[in-house]
Image: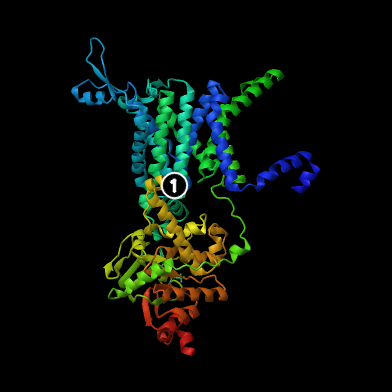
């Protein structure tokens, strides 16, 4: 850079101009950029009075708003939806049908109350019976179409809940194709392929929008601003974090208390709701709608806008949509014009026939390929690299007691309940012909550490999966404080107080340490989508308290994680990732914590430190069920050890008893080795 600046005067000037900017904190820079852009957007009709330009700008706002909606589904919740235009169509036809001459039922007294409300007009033509002409206001239909599209979002989303990746994409693609086909084939409602005619223009305080672009442009800008606001509020809330957790790892999200069904449907509903509103806006602007306007290329185009702009980044997708719209509406037209001029000059017929606007899909494809090759995170990535830590931060050591107190209270309650905290009776798990767990009985008393050991493939992880609801049991019962919890879904078990970590680390890698731990609190917090957007004081308090508790949980690991709150988990060392997983599980305030090989991949020093930390959890009264291959850790920590071999419990007792058991030695070392010993 410096070399450039010294050898190239232009680069030097640029660097000099940019230097003061660099001193401004990124947050302030971001806000200034947004304010400048908002001012530009508001003044555009004054700056550029050209009707064609304003019309294109109004269309661009529609696509930016659509991209914001799809961003909720694809960018935040990670649900690849290739049929998004279906909801755009539903919104468009909802308004179109209620505000055009499409439906003209015979007039009867049934319509009179609607006429008083101004939703219907009695229309009289000499010689024929009177008809009812629907004239529902745009301003009523705007939110209503959002709600209707959201309903369809849930309806179409429901069959896809068990699908992900390619399968989800194929099913959504199918829905995207079905909607225009249904529209085309129900002419009584939609006028079929001919399209709706005479959709009424909105009016506000007596001013009819008619066909001038400016009022539509401002409505579009307002909708984009509203959707950005809603997106930002959701992203930084309990709901947005749960969506991102589903995107990152569905299974871990469920084990942390996230109800996958409900949250996926919510994402489909919110995304569809945005599209429904924009459908209404778009059809009001065009005053017509045909099924061709909502075919697959539209869904693909919106998806390209989201990917190009930056999945999960509201400002990014708006930028992506606007740039691609500018490309489509202006740049390609201008370049085609220049090529025609050049063709005339050179007397070249071929150049004169080039129309780049016809090749828009090809150009969008090229944009997508280039984005994937050179800027996968998109123009404005959802998360930028985090700053380096200061020395003070690295050595910070916050000591707080909140979560520890809470865990102690839970532990005391658990200890006071008579009987074992967790009881397993005759547990069986079969995978086809393989019996991974065979008639295992087990009791874990509150406040103890019980270790589950056994050779590889003996069924330890399977037992954890069954206890935490990730895999259904084939037979047997699981009781938590005497209550039968067999067959409950993972999020419900997390709420009841069973938390776990995973053998192969299942963190939400593209989320920060703090966000990971906050997802752990999902079942202990209550904010819903509306609360997240409106953010009343109760939600702000819950969010603040959750953050404070997260910091308290992280303080269990001294200063290992506290200075790294805002680092994405993928940037952490392996040992720190293991710690985050334990912290995330602790954040759910469990009664029993299931740790699946927590010391795997840690060096001896780190293992020792972790063993100390697990012991401190026990000192707080927490019950721990532990799978671990490092036998020194097990001997050191466990009150009791349970040994599995080929899915069967072959021994149980104190560490000394278990180590003296010949069956255990045989399972670990083999029959011959035991005989020689
Ligand atoms: N989803 C599955 N489908 C089919 N078989 C499975 C499945 N999960 C586990 N198994 C089988 O169940 C048996 C027990 O596996 P499990 O992973 O529980 O063992 P483990 O004791 O945890 O082993 P390790 O110490 O290697 O983690 C193995 O034979 C394994 O192949």
Q: What residue would you read off at disc 1?
A: 234
Q: As displayed, is residue 45 above or below residue 467?
A: above
Q: Quadrant of residue 455?
A: bottom left
Q: Is residue 439 visible?
A: no
Residue found at x 48% / y 69%: 556
Query: Whole-percent x and y of residue 298?
Result: 47, 34
If the picture is divided into quarters, which one holds ligand 1?
Answer: bottom left
Query: Whole-percent x and y of residue 58?
Result: 49, 28
Mark 1 nearby-residue class (10 Å; few <14, some 14–19, many ≥20): many
Q: Is residue 114 left or right of residue 491?
A: left
Residue found at x 35% / y 43%: 154
What sort of colour scheme is used for the picture? Answer: rainbow
Q: Residue furthest top?
A: 126
Q: Residue furthest left?
A: 109
Query: Whole-percent x and y of residue 438?
Result: 34, 72
Q: Is residue 405 left or right of residue 345?
A: left
Q: Is mark 1 within 8 Å of ligand 1?
A: no
Q: As displayed, is residue 500 above or below residue 310?
A: below
Residue found at x 41% / y 38%: 274
597 vs 121, nearest the viewer: 121
Q: Is residue 605 visible?
A: yes
Residue found at x 47% / y 43%: 71
Q: How many marks?
A: 1
Q: Residue furthest right?
A: 7
Q: Quadrant of residue 463?
A: bottom left
403 vs 122, nearest the viewer: 403
Q: Is residue 4 left or right of residue 51?
A: right
């Amino acid at each position: 850079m410096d070399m450039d600046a010294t050898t190239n005067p232009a680069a030097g000037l640029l660097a000099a101009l940019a230097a003061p900017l660099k001193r401004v904190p990124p947050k302030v820079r971001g806000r200034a950029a947004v304010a400048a852009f908002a001012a530009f957007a508001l003044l555009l009709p004054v700056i550029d009075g050209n009707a064609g330009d304003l019309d294109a700008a109004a269309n661009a706002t529609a696509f930016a708003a659509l991209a914001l909606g799809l961003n909720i589904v694809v960018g935040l919740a990670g649900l690849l939806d290739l049929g998004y235009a279906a909801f755009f169509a539903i919104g468009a036809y909802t308004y179109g049908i209620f505000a055009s001459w499409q439906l003209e039922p015979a007039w009867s007294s049934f319509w009179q109350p609607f006429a008083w409300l101004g939703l219907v007009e009695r229309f009289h033509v000499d010689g024929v019976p009177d008809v009812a002409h629907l004239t529902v206001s745009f301003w009523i239909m705007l939110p209503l179409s959002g709600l209707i599209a959201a309903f369809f979002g849930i309806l179409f989303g429901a069959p896809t809940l068990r699908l992900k990746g390619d399968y989800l994409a194929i099913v959504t693609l199918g829905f995207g194709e079905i909607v225009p086909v249904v529209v085309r084939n129900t002419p009584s409602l939609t006028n079929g392929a001919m399209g709706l005619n005479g959709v009424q223009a909105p009016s506000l305080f007596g001013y009819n929008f008619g066909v001038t672009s400016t009022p539509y442009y401002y409505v579009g800008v307002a909708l984009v601003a509203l959707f950005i606001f809603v997106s930002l509020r959701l992203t930084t809330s309990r709901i947005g974090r749960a969506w991102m957790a589903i995107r990152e790892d569905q299974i871990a999200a469920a084990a942390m208390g996230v109800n996958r069904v409900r949250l996926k449907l919510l994402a489909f509903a919110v995304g569809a709701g945005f599209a429904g509103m924009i459908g209404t806006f778009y059809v009001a602007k065009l005053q017509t709608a045909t099924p061709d306007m909502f075919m697959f290329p539209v869904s693909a185009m919106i998806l390209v806008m989201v990917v190009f702009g930056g999945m999960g980044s509201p400002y990014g997708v708006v930028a992506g949509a606007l740039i691609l719209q500018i490309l489509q509406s202006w740049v390609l037209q201008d370049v085609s014009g220049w090529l025609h001029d050049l063709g005339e000059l050179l007397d070249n017929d071929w150049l004169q026939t080039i129309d780049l606007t016809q090749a828009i899909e090809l150009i969008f494809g090229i944009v997508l390929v280039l984005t994937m090759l050179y800027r996968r995170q998109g123009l404005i990535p959802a998360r930028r690299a985090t700053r380096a830590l200061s020395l003070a931060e690295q050595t910070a050591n916050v000591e707080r007691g909140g979560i520890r107190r809470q865990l102690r209270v839970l532990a005391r309650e658990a200890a006071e309940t008579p009987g074992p905290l967790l009881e397993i009776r005759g547990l069986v798990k079969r995978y086809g012909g393989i019996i991974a767990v065979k008639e295992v009985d087990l009791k874990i008393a509150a406040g103890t550490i019980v270790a589950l050991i056994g050779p590889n493939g003996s069924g330890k992880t399977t037992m954890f999966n069954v206890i935490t609801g990730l895999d259904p049991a084939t037979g047997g019962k699981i009781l938590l404080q005497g209550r039968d919890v067999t067959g409950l879904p993972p999020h419900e078990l997390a709420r009841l107080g069973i938390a776990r970590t995973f053998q192969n680390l299942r963190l939400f890698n593209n989320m920060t340490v703090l966000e990971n731990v906050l997802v752990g609190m999902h079942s202990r917090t209550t904010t819903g989508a509306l609360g997240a957007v409106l953010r009343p004081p109760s939600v702000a308090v819950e969010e603040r308290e959750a953050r404070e508790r997260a910091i308290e949980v992280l303080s269990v690991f001294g200063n290992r994680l506290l200075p790294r709150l805002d680092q994405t988990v993928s940037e952490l060392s392996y040992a720190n990732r293991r710690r985050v997983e334990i912290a995330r599980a602790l954040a759910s305030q469990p009664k029993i914590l299931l740790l699946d090989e927590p010391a795997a991949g840690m060096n001896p020093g780190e293992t020792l430190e972790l063993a100390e930390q697990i012991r401190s959890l026990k000192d707080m009264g927490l019950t721990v069920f532990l799978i671990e291959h490092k036998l020194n850790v097990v001997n050191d920590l466990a009150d009791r050890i349970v040994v599995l071999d080929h899915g069967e419990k072959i021994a149980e007792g104190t560490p000394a008893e278990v180590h003296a058991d010949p069956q255990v030695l045989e399972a670990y070392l083999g029959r011959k080795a035991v005989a020689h010993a």
